[in-house]
Image (spheres, rainbow, N blue to C red):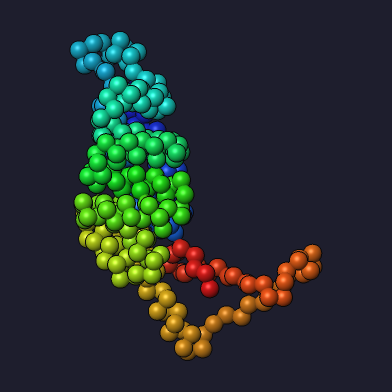
């Protein structure tokens, strides 16, 4: 029963975990990947940390199990203190801490997995990169962006790296690479939710072209902007005005 509670807790916590990269990235595809993987991660975490004995009566065996996700994660951390070279354990700890909202802890755990695998474990590389982004979205233009590229060299089909690698390419003004990566993700045997989200991102790539066509036909919207009286004297006449627009395909905001 304790295992079922923990496993269910991981699956439910995935909803919160999913929202962060989706909200920041403006899409849903990678979220669905995580949602599918988390129940398996829960099973792996339980198997790795549990000392459940099927030879004992259920009541006696159950009394030895941790009673919460936090306790299971704490037990995993203690095991890793004794077995620090277990890369799989560090990856499980990183995923679990991310689910719990402990993004600095997830980053540190994945950093251990990355270091101890000498950067040759694609899952550790992409997990570390994602944890960096969860702590600071600007990492997409920094180390995390390069780590996603490294992960794709190690494992061209890594779903996490394909999704974020597409975002990295899109942000640096390379829509064709973004398209190739999202199409590669779409070609995988993925759940319908992922397929729909990837399709939305691909549609967003075509949105600027559609907007340009509309502008050529004279289409547009009229906008009136007024400053609050209290702000009039505080804004210089040469001040810049920035507008943020969103496409109908629910893509990320675009500065215009």
122 w.r.t. 106: above or below:
below
173 w.r.t. 54: above or below:
below
10 w.r.t. 159: above or below:
above
Q: Quadrant of residue 243?
A: bottom right
Q: Quadrant of residue 58?
A: top left
Q: Nearer the viewer, residue 58 or 205?
A: 205
The spot of residue 255 in percent (x, y) is 52, 69
The residue under the point 42% across, 76% down is 208
The residue under the point 47% across, 49% down is 136
The spot of residue 207 in percent (x, y) is 41, 74
The residue under the point 79% across, 64% down is 230
The spot of residue 250 in percent (x, y) is 45, 64
State how many labels appear.
Answer: 0
Q: Nearer the viewer, residue 214 or 171?
A: 171
26 sits to left or right of 111:
right
125 w.r.t. 243: above or below:
above
């Amino acid at each position: 029963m304790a295992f079922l509670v923990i496993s269910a807790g991981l699956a439910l916590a995935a909803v919160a975990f999913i929202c962060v990269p989706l909200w920041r990235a403006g899409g849903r595809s990678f979220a669905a990947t995580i949602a599918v993987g988390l129940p398996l991660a829960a099973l792996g975490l339980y198997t790795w940390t549990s000392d459940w004995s099927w030879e004992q009566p259920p009541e006696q065996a159950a009394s030895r199990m941790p009673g919460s996700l936090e306790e299971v994660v704490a037990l995993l951390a203690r095991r890793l203190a004794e077995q620090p070279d277990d890369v799989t354990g560090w990856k499980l700890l990183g995923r679990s801490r991310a689910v719990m909202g402990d993004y600095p802890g997830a980053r540190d755990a994945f950093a251990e997995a990355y270091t101890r695998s000498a950067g040759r474990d694609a899952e550790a590389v992409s997990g570390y990169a994602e944890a960096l982004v969860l702590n600071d979205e600007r990492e997409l233009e920094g180390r995390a962006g390069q780590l996603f590229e490294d992960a794709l060299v190690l494992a061209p089909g890594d779903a996490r790296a394909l999704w974020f690698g597409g975002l990295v390419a899109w942000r640096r003004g390379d829509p064709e690479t973004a398209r190739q990566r999202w199409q590669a993700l779409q070609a995988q045997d993925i759940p319908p939710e992922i397929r729909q989200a990837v399709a939305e991102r691909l549609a967003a790539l075509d949105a600027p072209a559609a907007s340009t066509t509309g502008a050529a036909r004279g289409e547009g919207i009229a906008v009136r902007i007024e400053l609050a009286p209290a702000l009039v004297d505080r804004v210089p006449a040469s001040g810049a005005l920035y507008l943020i627009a969103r496409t109908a395909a629910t893509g990320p905001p675009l500065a215009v």
